Amino acid sequence: MARVLHEDKVILWDVCTMDHKRGIEALNRALLGIRDHNQLIGGVTVLLDGDCRHALLIVPRDTHVNNVKACLKSSILWSNAKILSLRINMRFVLQRDLRAK
């Protein structure tokens, strides 16, 4: 696994909004060690996919405040994120899928 992570150029993290902020922070620490690199996340581009407006991470037996503090946007890495938004619904454009509108 370390060899694969050492050679990766891009990592896609799907539905990241449902994961604890410690996940991306652990990935950062692991890649810094594996790649022997000083840049965040070992210099790898990470595409985080998810919609922060939908479901918030739920930490069992914890308070709402702690749930918010556990979400990805509360991570120390979040200030370095570049936010990109989709402007065209490609499923609708390519398939004329009316459910996608």
Image (cartoon, grey):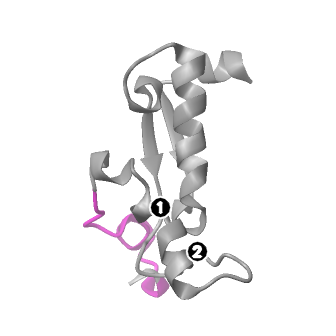
User: Considering the image in quadrants, where does the C terminus appear?
Assistant: bottom left
Q: Check disc 2 and report its element: helix, strand or loop.
A: loop
Residue 71 appears at what percent x and percent y? 50, 67
Left or right: 28 with respect to 53?
right
Say what amino acid the circle numbered 1 marks.
Answer: Leu
Say which label, 2 or 1, has the lower sequence index. 2
Q: Check disc 1 and report its element: helix, strand or loop.
A: helix
Residue at 43% x, 56% y is 75
On residue 85, the disc is none
88 or 47, which is in the foreground? 47
Left or right: 34 with respect to 38?
right
On residue 72, the disc is 1
Say what amino acid the circle numbered 2 marks.
Answer: Leu
Left or right: 100 with respect to 31?
left
Magenta range is 84-99
Dot 2 and dot 1 residues touching (CB under 8 Å):
yes
Residue at 61% x, 29% y is 30
Residue at 44% x, 28% y is 44
Residue at 47% x, 58% y is 49
Residue 86 appears at what percent x and percent y? 30, 63
Q: Quadrant of residue 8?
A: top right
Vertical placement of 9 versus 26: above or below? above
Task: Determine if the magenta segment contains residue 98.
Answer: yes
Residue 72 appears at what percent x and percent y? 47, 61
40 or 45, which is in the foreground? 40
User: Considering the image in quadrants, where does the N terminus appear?
Assistant: top right
Mark pair 2, 1: CA separation: 9 Å
Residue at the spot of label 2: 57
